[in-house]
Amino acid sequence: MIAGVILVPIIFGIAVFIIPWQKVRRWLLVIAAGLHLAMVIILFLRPPRPMLGGWLALDVLGLLFLAIVSLLFFVSSVYGFSYLSQSALEQEKSRRDPERLFIACLLVFLATMSLVTVAHHLGLLWVAIEATTLASAPLIFFHRTVPSLEATWKYLLICSVGIALALFGTFFLAAASAVGEGGAPLTLDQLLRMGSRLDVRLLRIAFIFLLVGYGTKMGLAPMHTWLPDAHSEAPSVVSSLLSGVLLNCAFLGILRSYQICAAAGQATFAQSILLIFGILSMLLAAVFILNQPDYKRMLAYSSVEHMGILALGVGLGPTAFFYTLFHALNHSLTKGMLFMSAGNILAVYKTKTSSAISGLVKHLPMTGALWILGFLAITGTPLFGLFVSEFNILGAAVGQERYVVAALFLFLLTAIFIGMGARILPMVQGSPKEEGGKSKECFWMWAAPMALLAMTFILGLHIPAWLHRLLTVSASDLGGMQ
Amino acid sequence: MQTVSDIVLILVLLSDLYLIGLTRLGASIKVVAFQGVLLALLPIFSPNMTFSIHLLIIALGSLSIKAILIPAFLFRAIREVNIRMEIDSYIPYSASLLAGMGIVLVSFWVTSKFNLPVIVASTLWTPTALTAVMIGLLILISRKKAITQVLGYLVLENGIYILGLSLVAQMPFLVEMGVLLDVFVGVFIMGIIINHIKDIFDDLNVENLTILKD
């Protein structure tokens, strides 16, 4: 079954590449996503055995991230189905149809992300994360415009170089585990079992390289420079996947490195570095959000902010782990729906400049409502899931008497709230600049993001028992406690 | 065997420095291809690696990908551009060369300082790897042509590969092949993007790619 979540999308991807009928290809995308989700549910109900000598295994932490990937991909595929039908109408005149490659790459992208969540060999993890970059680069270039060309080039080059540094770190990790004789196993379980027998000095070097490498991919400042370009120029269905789940996959890579550090008694060292990267990312995101005329870029910088919060959460240590993971889940749901809404707006108005748009609620009622509710959810307004997680991360900072961190955290969140509000509220209110009254909105293109919004709303009110257990076990795995 | 592997390492080091000073794109690609050959020789001639089928496949894999496929692909990419082939640099060549010398010195100094547990018994491995990584980065950030940036990435990747060989006696076969495949597909996609850059701008300068900023 573990192999299934990787192989099924690949098989469907190949099928899509061969099949000549456009309609069938789109259906295959949704079917593959549905199958993937079904398999993840089965994996949840029946924990699988490790495969390939412990190289592929699904622990609870991996399952949590796999579930996020699968859920968001399924919703995105439903949205993407309508998105492709609409953009196909506009692109009828274009000389050739890039959709075949697009859907095939989407499915391979799903397979590589699934591989990241089940890879328990650090080398394989690296291969998988680099493969996500390669599978997603053609997706960003879907519209074949000059800005998207630039974004794709930056994405490919900066992420490849960043991840090359993570390979450097992986080798150092192997060296750290090669004490005495015998080869380095480099499987997560073996490394955790070695614990304090790892060479501390080399482990520290390894962690720094892994953090910088995977941090580039995760969008931590100051390695985030590719992120606003790639996430704003990609088609919106891809943006929601990039921001919603791909960043999480890189975060998982960092969490795995952290786990090993914690097992070797180096948790405080790793935490202090993560804390600095976290604060820096939030700070940088706030600065760029405050004066951001482009609403998709604004969402991209908001992703940098939330990745900063995740790094900060891990940096605060075990008391914040539960809600950090909860934050990752809610961020995926919220950012996914926001990028989908942004896609709806972009499709109608054909501009990414927020000041050019007004009267969204009157013109596109459902999208307008989603846009404003999504804004409230992403900035951590009460009643939404992100409020609960941010509140508790703040609580953890205060509980450890780190008042400076807590104050900075609160200040930056407020600044970002104001910055985003100042751009988003004028878009929603007022009267439409163009006449024409209501535009027709495709059902699935607002229902899909609405479903994600509903989920994060429910999570803000109540965490179901099974999810609570999932998060608790993941958090305790991270703390190094068995 | 020790001397052979040392000679190979010195050749890698020299080819890195030579690459900095080159101005013709075609010659640069040839140097990177030559490095691919050297890298394939390295595991075979390293003193404490026992010869095995596994090792042979890795050597053949890196030979065919790094020395043949990637260079051939890059040559095809530049052949179609009918513009002048000279490499543009943000940093003057003499300064780049000086920086390269500095990098070599720093690499040897760092290695002696940190005393890394080198499994392969030669003092040249780690400094060569570090030099390659840093020179790769230098080329990446200082050159204006998209294709030279790819070459910088390859040099960087080669450095990491050498370090991997020196720190880890044997990475699992699957991982090494995975890394090689990732690099190859990466360069392949970069090549496609380069083709698009060329189609749109009729030029390979990355200075064209500066629309997106805040």
Image (cartoon, coloured by chain):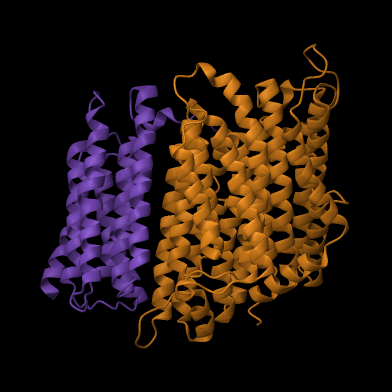
Chain colours: A orange, B purple
Residue A417: give x, y in percent of width and height: 79, 43
Residue B86 seen anywhere in this rendered image of the structure: no
**Is A36 above or below relative to A83?**
below
**Is A349 above or below relative to A117?**
above
**Is A173 above or below relative to A331?**
below
Determine the image quadrant of residue B163: bottom left
Residue A254: give x, y in percent of width and height: 56, 64
Q: Quadrant of the C terminus of chain A?
A: bottom right
Residue at x-position 31% and y-position 62%: B161
* Left or right: residue A56 compared with residue B91: right
Out of A118 and A264, give the one closest to the viewer.
A118
Q: Residue furthest top?
A: A435
Residue at x-position 60% and y-position 35%: A232
Residue A109 seen anywhere in this rendered image of the structure: yes
Q: Quadrant of the N terminus of chain A?
A: bottom right
Out of A10 and A192, give the one closest to the viewer.
A10
**Is A442 above or below relative to A32?**
above
Residue B122: give x, y in percent of width and height: 21, 75
Residue at x-position 75% and y-position 44%: A416
* Left or right: residue B48 compared with residue B171: left
Residue A79: give x, y in percent of width and height: 67, 37
Residue at x-position 33% and y-position 25%: B203
Determine the image quadrant of residue A463: bottom right
All told, the count of numbered labels is 0
Out of A16 and A308, give the one closest to the viewer.
A16
